[in-house]
Image (cartoon, rainbow, N blue to C red):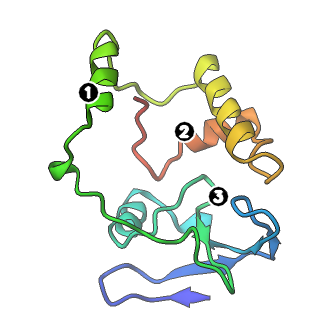
Amino acid sequence: MNVCRQDGLQSLRLFITAEHPCNYLSGHRARNLVVDPRAVNARVYTQLVQVRLPPQRQSAFIGPICTNCTACTCHCDVPVMSFHPSRSQNRTWKKNLDLAVRCLEPSFRLDHYRLFERYLKSRHPGGGMDDTSYEDYLAFITSAWSDTRAL
């Protein structure tokens, strides 16, 4: 499928994968929308993000595009400027004042990779994402089309 948008996004070839078991909803089937990975560069990635279609991996996966389900495709804007923490959130904040956030260049770190593996095994068991290899992880964090930083 070729898509040409009037909002300035260049024409891109999009593909829909074969149906497979849904990673999110047990018993459901899913298809994924992907961009031709050869077409994704920093400029295209920025444009895709601006129209809410950010590729999520080196494979240029955009997201699910299922026939009879929209459970995981909703976009929502979170009004962060009007957020007011609850008392328990304030307590949690105070307990963690000793933590520091650093912005790191993308590089392989074994502790980060193990955390990523634990996340996938816990949140996506048996869905095809939980067997992501070292090479897949490295391609994900050092993609040429995204200026990635680790926090």
Q: Is residue 140 above or below residue 94?
A: below
Disc 3 from disc 1: Cα separation = 40 Å
Judging by the rendered image, the residue that carries numbered circle 1 is 90
Question: Residue at the spot x=26%, y=30% of the render?
Answer: 87
Left of 57 or right of it: where is 98?
Answer: left
Question: Residue at the spot x=39%, y=87% of the render?
Answer: 5
Residue 4 in the image, given as x and y percentages of width and height: 44, 89
Disc 3 from disc 2: Cα separation = 12 Å
Q: Is residue 117 above or below residue 91?
A: below
Secondary structure state at the residue bearing disc 3 = loop
Task: Examine the image and state in which quarter residue 62 appears.
Answer: bottom right
Q: Which mark is residue 146?
A: none
* Nearest to viewer (mark 1 / mark 2): 1
Q: Earlier in the sequence, mark 3 or mark 1?
A: 3
Give the amino acid type for the residue marked by disc 2 in the picture: Ile
**Other residues around mark 3 within 10 Å, as few (<14) / some (14–19) / many (≥20):** some
Give the amino acid type for the residue marked by disc 3 in the picture: Ser
Left of 16 or right of it: where is 6?
Answer: left
**Other residues around mark 2 within 10 Å, as few (<14) / some (14–19) / many (≥20):** some
Residue 97 in the image, given as x and y percentages of width and height: 28, 14
Secondary structure state at the residue bearing disc 2 = helix
Judging by the rendered image, the residue that carries numbered circle 3 is 59
